């Protein structure tokens, strides 16, 4: 019974997350800024509106390194509902899988034979980026078969609408067939944020596994005030770092201040072991500063402001009706912008028939932005357009319209044509019959003579 409840809850959360990602009709726009970014793929999204405000090659396949563990967390937490009390044995043969890989670990070799809570293992995986914790969790959920766990990862990616993602392992070690994109990783992380403990764990800088007297330390200097140095950014929270020779530096993180929240996904920043500069962290902090200082939520059209009008039929003394947005049209824009940079294009019918109720959806609008630095307009937002008032139907005009439709209908025209033809045939036959009758009368008269 408990498993059914948990499964139902998981399905609900998945639907909620998908709705969260899709409920806002925001566009994908990349505003010009002066940030000199080092990462090859970047997606910066306002989390309040789901609006992309900056992107740089977000759809190219990239190796995700340990940002993979965001998906690993999802699968683990959804399959271990009682994560606080479930204890998992640390098996030596499972840890041996990582021998020779140079993996980052949580020193679980010190716990071989012990049983740690799933919660401890989640911290061990996400805080110090422990590959050992990732494979232990995958082995447990997969009932001794890590490949089954990986299958669940790929199934979940498809459910979340990821279009260019494929996993080969739960830890992010390099594999040519293990890849994602910045846009897909945003979808995955947005969903992960709905999972229990995810935000808390990924924003933890120091954690002690039960029984240990040495801490697990975060790999994310962006959120570590004590050890982060020049990388530390006070408004950043979480989420996950990743580094391999092939993936370069990778980072998924969020930044919040003054009522605004952004998520940054940064992949493939240059990485050299002898000169280990975290370009992703510089990029994230600089982009957050720019977005939080230079951008704002702008009200483009309120729900009571007309956008356009359409023709109206079957209404007495009224031949047009105004359309307004179903909701206020808002979008993240630069604080200093020229209103002429925003244009609205509508998709509405030439006319509609009464009766119409206020709020009936009639068409849609697409809001575009193009400033002086852009060569093409970019989609900023979309909105439904609704009737601004209720209008009754005129019974007299309706009857006339029905009669007109009948008269102009194909079947009526065919019927009339058939009747005309029958009348013509009747007249021809009648005329011929009269001629025959006249001839018969003449012949009879002649014989009588």
Image (tube, rainbow, N blue to C red):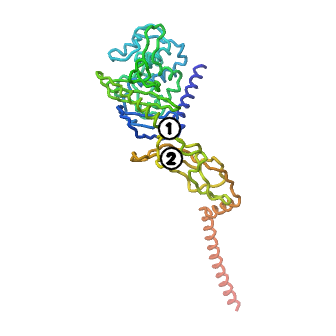
Q: Nearer the viewer, mark 1 or mark 2?
A: 1
Residue 421 in the image: x percent, y percent?
61, 70
Residue 228 in the image: x percent, y percent?
40, 20
- Residue 308 visible? The answer is yes
Figure check: 393 above or below 103: below
Residue 347 in the image: x percent, y percent?
53, 51
Which of 285/173 is in front? 285
Q: Quadrant of the C terminus?
A: bottom right
| Residue at (53, 38) in percent of width and height | 24
| Residue at (36, 16) in percent of width and height | 98
Q: Check residue 366 in the rendering and tell me which mark sits there, or answer none.
A: 2
Return the residue at label 1.
296
Figure check: 309 above or below 173: below
Locate residue 225: give its quadrant.
top left
Figure check: 438 above or below 136: below
Q: Residues within 10 Å of mark 2 (few under 14, many from 20)?
A: some
Q: Check residue 92 in the rendering and tell me which mark sits there, or answer none.
A: none
Which of 71/369 is in front? 369
Which of 318/256 is in front? 256
Q: Residues within 10 Å of mark 1 (few under 14, many from 20)?
A: some
């Amino acid at each position: 019974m408990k498993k059914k409840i948990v499964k139902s809850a998981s399905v609900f959360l998945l639907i909620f997350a998908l709705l969260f990602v899709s409920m806002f009709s925001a566009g994908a726009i990349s505003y010009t800024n002066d940030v000199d970014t080092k990462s090859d793929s970047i997606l910066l999204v306002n989390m309040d509106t789901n609006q992309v405000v900056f992107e740089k090659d977000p759809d190219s396949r990239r190796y995700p390194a340990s940002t993979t563990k965001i998906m690993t967390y999802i699968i683990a937490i959804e399959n271990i509902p009682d994560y606080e009390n479930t204890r998992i044995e640390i098996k030596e043969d499972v840890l041996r899988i990582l021998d020779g890989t140079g993996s980052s670990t949580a020193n679980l070799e010190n716990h071989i034979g012990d049983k740690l809570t799933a919660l401890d293992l989640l911290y061990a995986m996400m805080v110090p980026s422990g590959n050992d914790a990732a494979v232990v969790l995958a082995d447990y959920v997969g009932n001794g078969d890590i490949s089954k766990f990986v299958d669940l990862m790929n199934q979940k990616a498809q459910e979340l609408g990821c279009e260019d993602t494929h996993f080969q392992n739960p830890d992010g070690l390099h594999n040519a067939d293990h890849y994602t994109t910045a846009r897909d990783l945003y979808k995955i992380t947005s969903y992960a944020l709905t999972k229990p403990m995810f935000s808390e764990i990924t924003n933890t800088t120091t954690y002690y596994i039960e029984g240990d007297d040495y801490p697990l330390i975060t790999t994310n200097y962006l959120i570590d005030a004590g050890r982060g140095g020049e990388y530390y950014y006070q408004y950043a929270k979480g989420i996950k770092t990743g580094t391999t020779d092939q993936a370069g530096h990778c980072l998924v993180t969020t930044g919040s201040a003054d009522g605004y929240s952004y998520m940054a996904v940064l992949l493939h920043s240059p990485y050299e072991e002898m000169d280990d500069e975290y370009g992703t962290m510089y990029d994230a902090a600089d982009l957050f500063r720019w977005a939080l200082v230079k951008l704002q939520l702008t009200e483009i059209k309120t729900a009571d402001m007309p956008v356009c009008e359409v023709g109206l039929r079957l209404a007495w003394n009224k031949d047009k009706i105004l359309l307004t947005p179903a909701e206020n049209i808002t979008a993240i824009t630069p604080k200093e912008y020229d209103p002429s940079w925003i244009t609205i294009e509508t998709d509405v019918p030439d006319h509609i028939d009464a009766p119409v109720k206020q709020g009936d959806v009639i068409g849609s609008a697409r809001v575009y932005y193009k400033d002086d630095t852009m060569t093409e307009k970019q989609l900023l937002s979309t909105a439904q357009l609704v009737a601004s008032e209720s209008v009754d139907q005129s019974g007299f005009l309706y009857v006339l319209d029905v009669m007109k439709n009948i008269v102009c209908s194909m079947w009526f025209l065919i019927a009339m044509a058939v009747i005309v033809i029958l009348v013509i045939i009747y007249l021809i036959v009648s005329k011929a019959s009269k001629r025959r009758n006249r001839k018969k009368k003449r012949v009879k008269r002649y014989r009588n003579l």
